[in-house]
Amino acid sequence: MAKCTAPINGHRTASGRANCPACGGSYGVYNHYSSYSSPSYISASSGGSSSTGSSLRPRWSKSGSSLSYTPAEIQSLTPIREAVEKRAVLQPDLLDAFLCHAWDDRKGAAKELHDLLVAAGIKVWFSEQDLGLGVPMMRAIDKGLAKSRIGLVLVTPVMLERLTKESVADKELSALLAGNHLIPIVHNTSYEALRNVSPLLASRTGLDTSEDSMEVVAKKIAELVEI
């Protein structure tokens, strides 16, 4: 069965709907996806930024939530949410998340994000305690993921520099990403800059503080891990 392209391409125009393999030429409102079963998102009446101009909430977002997501965020975070739900059943004693960051960010952006996550009710494994000078980044990430439902990698200019010097092995990063546990959070840089250093990590769309404040990012993570 053909699937509706609205979650990715949108139906804001007649041509957009006409080009959809599921909806064809039958026009209707944007948020009516009659042929799209089990959607990973729901429409939201609250305000919020979105790359398509619409306000969307993922299926795990509770009624009344003020947060809205872009289609790309929902598409990327949905498999991570599914992994969270499975791990919550199999390993109920895990922490909610671990935070990996560059050493030089430990008193700045990393601490800010950590404090906001804690304020949002998240139990965080803070990698500052293990990612010391000389500690291989991938070892810290692997250790943190083993103790937590999801992993957060705070991507800053300092982190990009460290990634360059550390030469993260593609096979190691690929294994971590395949588990749907790792979320990059880009801060004061861009996914394009990350892609130049680590195409594999950049292939996983995460969250970006140029689109949302650090506080909103923390709240989205809190929604993602709450069971």
Image (cartoon, grey):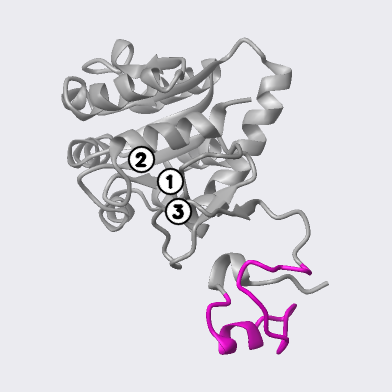
User: Which mark's residue is nearer the viewer, 3 or 2?
Assistant: 2
* Residue plotted at (31% across, 10% down): 129
Let me know if residue 46 appears in the view.
yes
Question: For residue 165, which quarter of the picture?
Answer: top left
> Amino acid type of disc 2?
Ile
In the rendered image, the vertical position of residue 213 relative to residue 132, given as above or below: below
Which one is nearer the viewer's eye here, 30 or 211? 30
Tag shown at residue 203: 3
The answer to whether 147 is drawn above or below residue 5 in the figure is above
Q: Amino acid at mark 1?
A: Gly
Query: Residues at badges 3 and 1 in contact (C-beta under 8 Å)?
Result: no
Look at the picture and state if 144 lies above or below 208.
Answer: above
**Residue 13 locus on image (x, y percent):** 54, 84
Image mark for residue 185: 2
Q: Nearer the viewer, residue 218 or 68?
A: 68
Q: Which numbered dot is residue 206? A: 1
Q: Quadrant of the N terminus?
A: bottom right
Q: Determine whether, in the image, residue 213 is placed left or right of residue 170.
A: left
Helix, strand or loop at disc 2? strand
CA separation in Å, label 1 and label 2: 6 Å
Q: In the rendered structure, are the residues bearing label 1 and label 2 in contact, judged by CB atoms less than 8 Å apart?
A: yes
> Whole-percent x and y of residue 149?
56, 24
- Identify the magenta region: 11-35
The secondary structure that dominates the magenta segment is loop
The residues bearing labels 3 and 2 have C-alpha atoms spaced at a distance of: 13 Å
